[in-house]
Image (cartoon, rainbow, N blue to C red):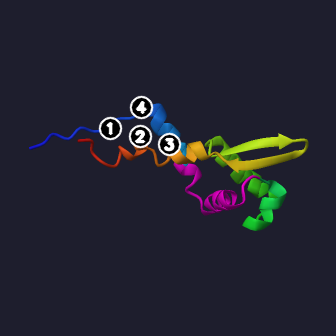
């Protein structure tokens, strides 16, 4: 019988993934990510009507995505532009995380 070894991740790494998955566990936040993936960087004023919510409610959702490092924010004067953090989103499908769901040989 072949012995199976398991991938183990540190508590910090697991907490990081938990924060990211909690951030994307909301339908509106998934919609925001989808829109930004198709349109590129956008400001709150342009994004709000596309997700059918007020700017204050949208800002709440954007903060959660920012705190999870799934978005980047660039400020120019009084305007803030939000864009996908593609590197972090790619890590959600990384070998490091995938190893939790399949045994190593």
Horizontal and vertical percent position of residue 32 = 67, 59
Contact (CB < 8 A) between labels 1 and 2? yes
Tell me if 23 is positioned left or right of 95 in this view. right
Question: Which range is magenta?
Answer: 21-41
Count neighbours of disc 3 (C-alpha within 10 A) and say few if under 14, some if 14 to 19, many if 20 or more: some
Q: Quadrant of the C terminus?
A: top left
Contact (CB < 8 A) between labels 4 and 2? no
Per the image, label 2 sits on a secondary structure element best described as helix
Q: Earlier in the sequence, mark 4 or mark 2?
A: 4
Q: Earlier in the sequence, mark 3 or mark 1?
A: 1
Q: Quadrant of the N terminus?
A: top left
Q: CA distance from mark 3 to mark 4?
A: 11 Å
Query: Residue tagged by mark 1?
Result: 7
Furthest residue in direction right, as rendered: 77
Q: CA distance from mark 4 to mark 2?
A: 11 Å
Query: Residue tagged by mark 3?
Result: 17
Q: Main secondary structure of the magenta part?
A: helix
Query: Residue tagged by mark 2?
Result: 96
């Amino acid at each position: 019988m072949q012995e199976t070894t398991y991938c183990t991740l540190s508590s910090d790494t697991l907490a990081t993934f938990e924060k990211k998955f909690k951030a994307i566990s909301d339908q509106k936040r998934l919609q925001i990510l989808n829109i930004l993936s198709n349109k590129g960087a956008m400001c709150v004023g342009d994004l709000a009507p596309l997700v059918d919510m007020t700017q204050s409610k949208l800002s709440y959702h954007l903060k959660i995505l920012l705190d999870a490092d799934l978005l980047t924010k660039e400020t120019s004067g009084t305007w803030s532009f939000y864009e996908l953090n593609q590197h972090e989103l790619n890590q959600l499908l990384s070998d490091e995380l995938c190893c939790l769901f399949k045994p190593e040989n």
